[in-house]
Amino acid sequence: ELLLSDEFLLDALTWEGINHRYPIPVSPEIANQGFSRPYISHLYGGSLRATFPSPSPDMLEWHGLDDWVFLNLEHCPHAPTRPGYSGLHFSQHRARGTWEKLRAPLRTFVKLASSQWVYMGQYRLVPGKSLTTTAWMEQKPEVRKTWATGMLNKQWGSNVLLRVWFRKTKGVE
């Protein structure tokens, strides 16, 4: 389980931020149409598994689109679930404004069902409040275990492990 506590979410975002919705001027049948990841990858290129896939140079030259994000509710349970709705993407990185993916809106797809990736719209990633040690300890044990396991087994935390190693061995951040 990766769901963070409601208390943390409300503290980090405010109720208005969580409930903000952009109007989508198309019918729900069109707005909620899902596509398989292989289909999207075949049309535009990019990895079938990466959260932020990069199309090959040939595909990029053809369509010029290198602004994709694919959020899976299994790993990103606070992602938007309807086009235009607000959502959250948490990572192991410290919240800072220098990440290149923050420069422009990203074409955001969310996996709502098996092989059903729904286009949510153009979303801008904005750094939020980092989870403090106290807020981390207030999360349910299952949440902490799932995140810790992902950090170790899925390499979500390789950069964090390197920072800890450098801090311990070299005394630098």
Image (cartoon, rainbow, N blue to C red):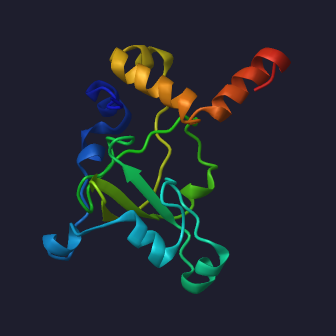
User: Residue 4's image quarter?
Assistant: top left
Residue 6 or 163: which is nearer the viewer?
163
Asked if residue 80 lies left or right of residue 54, the reply is left
Asked if residue 31 lies left or right of residue 139, the reply is left
Asked if residue 94 lies left or right of residue 69, the reply is right
Q: Quarter holding the C terminus? A: top right
Q: Could you tell me which residue is drawn at 32 percent across and 31 percent down?
A: 3
Q: Could you tell me which residue is drawn at 57 percent across and 27 percent down?
A: 152
Residue furthest out toward the right? 170
Residue 30 or 18: which is nearer the viewer?
30
Q: Quarter holding the N terminus? A: top left
User: Residue 112's image quarter?
Assistant: bottom left
Asked if residue 14 lies left or right of residue 44, the reply is left
Count of numbered circles on the image: 0
Residue furthest out toward the bottom? 62
Q: Position of residue 59 (x, y in %)?
A: 58, 79
Q: Is residue 20 above or below residue 75?
A: below
Q: Position of residue 17 (x, y in %)?
A: 30, 46
Q: Position of residue 46 (x, y in %)?
A: 54, 66
- Can residue 139 be seen by looking at this rendering? no
Q: Position of residue 45 (x, y in %)?
A: 53, 72
Q: Is residue 140 above or below residue 15?
A: above
Q: Could you tell me which residue is drawn at 46 percent across and 58 percent down?
A: 69
Q: Is residue 101 above or below residue 46?
A: above
Q: Could you tell me which residue is drawn at 55 percent across and 56 percent down?
A: 102
- Can residue 132 be seen by looking at this rendering? yes
